[in-house]
Image: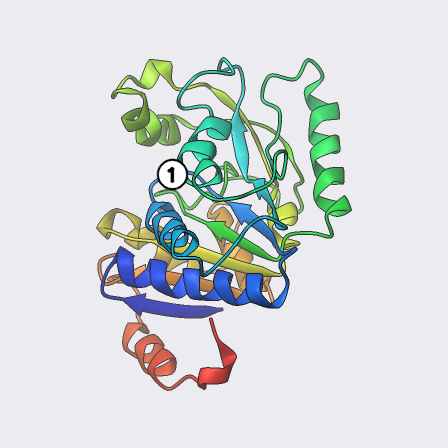
């Protein structure tokens, strides 16, 4: 696992956008994994700037979303398909239908989850998966206690996650759905490169467990320690609980330029 500590979200976004630009130039059919929440927003803004400047195109690429609420109306602004459309998909040149998400309004939820897994496999898997982390260590909506071998499925959100997400629902925790569809931890681990972004002191404890703690279903993100190519990008506040913070800074400062992110 590579840990990269940067001054702020904009510096992090630039590094991630550099890697995505490199992938798109090498292989325009690159498959991206898109996350919602606050963590990836600066990345999306930077990608849009590069697209508008003519540096990159998504016209031949595909993307898969991590998760989706169950039961939100199709036109609800916080339905994750609409959030992704608003924050990135509708601002660049993805082809129609190139961005897919799990169907949180499907009549047959288990079948919809199996179909989503099949769609990712049919696309050849995800090349680069963007991730955030919850204050309780969840990634996507894999809450504490999630199976490390899990695949796309329905999950019940914890009270903590619903409180954390209430800010997107005008502060009304009762408006946050109780259920979601989420890629499982094993699904996420199948991506070729995991890129997790965390900023702010509120993520410091979860980041400490992710990077330096034991692998445990109680801190689901720790499964990333078993991934052959996982990159964790942090600001100083999110990195404040790391025992080896100075070493991580030294490693990145002396990293061979040819390695990229």
Residue 103 higher or lower than 6, as above or below: above
Q: Residues within 10 Å of mark 1 (few under 14, many from 20)?
A: some
Residue 209 higher or lower than 141, as above or below: below
Q: Would residue 247 be found to the left or right of residue 100 on screen?
A: left
Asked which quadrant contains residue 167, the reply is top left
Asked if residue 215 can be seen in this view, the reply is no
Query: Residue at 65% of width from left, 46% of height from top?
Result: 187
Percent across and percent down for residue 185 are 60, 46
Residue 53 higher or lower than 84, as above or below: below
Asked if residue 106 can be seen in this view, the reply is yes
Q: Would residue 231 be found to the left or right of residue 167 on screen?
A: right
Secondary structure, mark 1, is: loop
Q: Which residue is mark 1?
A: 37
Residue nearest the viewer, comparing 18 with 204: 18
Query: Residue at 34% of width from left, 14% of height from top?
Result: 174
Residue nearest the viewer, comparing 220 with 4: 4
> How many badges with numbers are in the image?
1
Percent across and percent down for residue 98 are 62, 39
Query: Residue at 26% of width from left, 20% of height from top?
Result: 170
Percent across and percent down for residue 53 are 38, 57
Looking at the image, what colour scheme do you see? rainbow
Residue nearest the viewer, comparing 183 with 10: 10
Percent across and percent down for residue 233 are 37, 62
Query: Residue at 67% of width from left, 40% of height from top?
Result: 151
């Amino acid at each position: 696992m590579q840990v990269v500590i940067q001054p702020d979200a904009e510096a992090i976004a630039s590094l991630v956008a550099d890697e995505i630009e490199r992938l798109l130039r090498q292989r325009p059919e690159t498959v991206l994994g898109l996350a919602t929440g606050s963590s990836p927003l600066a990345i999306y803004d930077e990608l849009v700037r590069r697209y508008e400047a003519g540096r990159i195109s998504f016209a031949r690429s595909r993307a898969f979303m991590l998760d989706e609420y169950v039961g939100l109306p199709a036109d609800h602004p916080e339905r994750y398909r609409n959030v992704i459309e608003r924050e990135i998909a509708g601002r660049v040149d993805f082809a129609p239908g190139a961005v897919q998400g799990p169907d949180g309004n499907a009549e047959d939820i288990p079948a919809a989850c199996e179909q989503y897994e099949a769609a990712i496999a049919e696309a050849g898997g995800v090349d680069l998966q963007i991730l955030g982390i919850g204050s309780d260590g969840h990634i996507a909506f894999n809450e504490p206690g999630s199976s490390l071998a899990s695949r796309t499925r329905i999950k019940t959100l914890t009270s903590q996650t619903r409180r954390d997400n209430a800010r997107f629902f005008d502060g009304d925790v009762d408006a946050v759905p109780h259920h979601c569809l989420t890629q499982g931890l094993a699904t996420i681990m199948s991506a070729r490169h995991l890129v997790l972004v965390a900023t702010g002191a509120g993520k410091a404890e979860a980041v400490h467990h992710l990077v330096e703690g034991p692998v445990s279903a109680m801190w689901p993100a720790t499964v990333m320690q078993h991934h052959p190519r996982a990159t964790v990008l942090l600001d100083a506040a999110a990195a404040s609980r790391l025992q080896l913070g100075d070493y991580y800074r030294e490693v990145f400062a002396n990293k061979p330029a040819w390695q990229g992110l």
